Image (tube, rainbow, N blue to C red):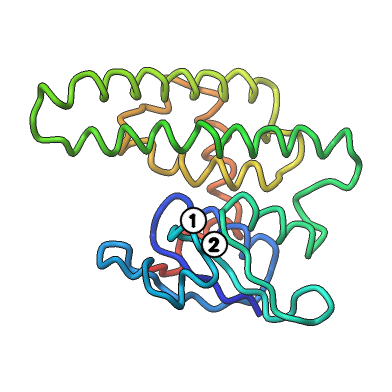
Amino acid sequence: MIEFYTWNTPNGRKISVALEEMGLAYNVHPVNIGKNEQFAPSFLAISPNNRIPAIVDTDGPGGKPISVFESGAILIYLAEKTGKFLPMDTRAKVPVLEWLMWQMGGFGPMPGQVHHFLQVADPVDQKYGLERYSKETRRLYGVLNKQLEGKAYVAGECSIADFAILGWAWRHERHQVDLADFPNVKRWYETIMARPGTKKGFEVALN
């Protein structure tokens, strides 16, 4: 059983989608980040950076529990546990890991900054940050759009890289991006959102 500590955020949705796609049994434990529950000692014991999501696998290696924090690490752990959505062959695995790291390092932090600056009330304080991070977010959508040309999924077959990227593409309207401007991303987004496991991953309550 996977004990899943999360909230209804892009990073939380990455994991709910992966759990459903992989067919794993799990329990959701909402961590209300609006009420600072991420700073509770019990949560910090499994997620020392006070960020969701985090998991505890009660049936970890050797049959003993193991905790994992950071969404990218969780995705890799779950893929290796189930043997799904991460190829064994090195040549096929490398692009999955590349695009997973691309999301973790850019396509998440950058639109996250857009979310932040959209909430800044003073237009003078808002202007530079919003322009900077909106431009970079759109650049990243362009990179993804080029990668998806002629491909159903970002690294060939559907993988944990797609789940990671989807968590943030799901919020495209919030960071003021029209997917019609990126037709390959739009096609990919509609394709993956239609998958039964992905649909369930977005329907499960996380808060």
Does the residue at mark 2 contact the one at mark 1 (Cβ under 8 Å)? yes
Front-most of residues 43 and 179: 43
Determine whether 141 is above or below 152 in the image: above
Residue 195 % position (x, y): 60, 52
Whether residue 151 sits left or right of residue 136 in the image: it is right
Q: Which residue is mark 2?
A: 16
Rendered residue at 75%/51% (across/down): 85
Residue 137 % position (x, y): 41, 25
What amino acid is at disc 1? Arg
Picture disc at residue 13: 1
Whether residue 32 sits left or right of residue 160 in the image: it is left
Whether residue 25 sits left or right of residue 80 in the image: it is left
Residue 13 % position (x, y): 49, 56
Front-most of residues 72 and 181: 72
Specify the farthest residue to the right. Answer: 89
Q: Secondary structure at mark 1?
A: helix
Residue 185 % position (x, y): 53, 29
Mark 2 is surrounded, within 10 Å at the Cα level, by few (under 14), some (14 to 19) or many (20 or more) other residues, namely many
Rendered residue at 17%/26% (across/down): 126
What amino acid is at disc 2? Ser
Which image quarter holds the C terminus?
Answer: bottom left
User: Which quadrant of the figure has residue 131?
Assistant: top left
